[in-house]
Image (tube, helix red, strand yellow):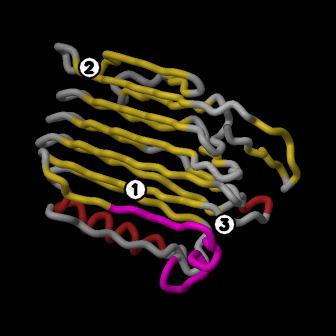
Amino acid sequence: MNTAILQSNNKPLKQRKIIVDGKARLIFNADAEGVTRLRDLYQSDPQRILFPNIPDKDITQAVVVNTAGGLVGGDKILVEVTVEKKANALVTTQSAEKVYRSAGTDAKIEINLIVEAGSWLEYLPQETILFEGSRLRRQTHVNVERDGKLIAGEIVVFGRLGYGEHFQTGLIHDGWEIIRDGKLVWVDALHMQDDIASIIADPACFDGAVSMATTVYIGPDAEDNLPVVQNFLESLNSGVLSSVTCVNG
């Protein structure tokens, strides 16, 4: 069993030896009037699902909460979201996911998103903060059917920047796999291990960036929206290095 040290201001606070294996599963469907309802829910510690009050006709929303306050080496988290035909839902997280320094074991996150025909899903969690010495393996699996639409994203922050701490050693393996109509259309993975500081500093890699973000949109109108995103990125003029591409429509 792994022991992780939770830190604040680079000073040890406490040790947590309890390894968690949390799960959150949600299934949404549309009733006869086309209103999206929660059809099924399963949650186990430390995962909890909150359902905020929303204005009438607003998209159905769910908020995933990690009551453990973060992940240490050996922890496992599973998030599964299914949006059935003609339903619409937004799933996010209550706060940033913190990944604490590990004594050697990896924390693991698995995310499975299923979007059926005629449905819409927004999966937009808040950022993941990688503490110095943390080890995280995360895999996101996406399956979109026919004219279903999905926008999903993630933000990774390299260290606790407010404390002057940078993610220099450890492990981050962050993979995506997207299937559309039964065909694998996109695979991507970020892998950094051990001497991460040199990778982040390398001009051919992150060129000193302090964070990164990935956003994926899947839908039959993806190619039509490509110029919109390109124009938006060009208008930012904020010094943020960015790019956009469209794969097979």
* x and y, in percent, of residue 182 in the image: 13, 45
| Residue 53 seen in the current view | yes
Q: Nearer the viewer, residue 173 or 27?
A: 173
Residue drawn 68% across the image and 41% down it:
2
Tell me if mark 2 has few (under 14), some (14-19) or many (20+) residues whose alpha carbon lies within 10 angstroms of its own: some
Direction from residue 15 to residue 236 in the image, left or right: left
* SS at badge 1: strand
- Residue beneath label 2, please? 35
Residue drawn 22% across the image and 27% down it:
84
Spatial CA span between label 3 and label 2: 48 Å
- Residue beneath label 3, please? 169
* x and y, in percent, of residue 91 in the image: 42, 35
- Mark 2 or 1: the one toward you: 1
Q: Which numbered tag is attached to residue 175?
A: 1
In the image, is residue 124 part of the stretch drawn in magenta?
A: no
Task: State the residue lying farthest toward the top.
Answer: 32
Over which residues does the magenta segment extend? 188-205
Up/down of 163 relative to 37, above or below: below
- Please state which amino acid type lies under the numbered disc 3: Thr
Mark 2 or 1 closer to N-term?
2
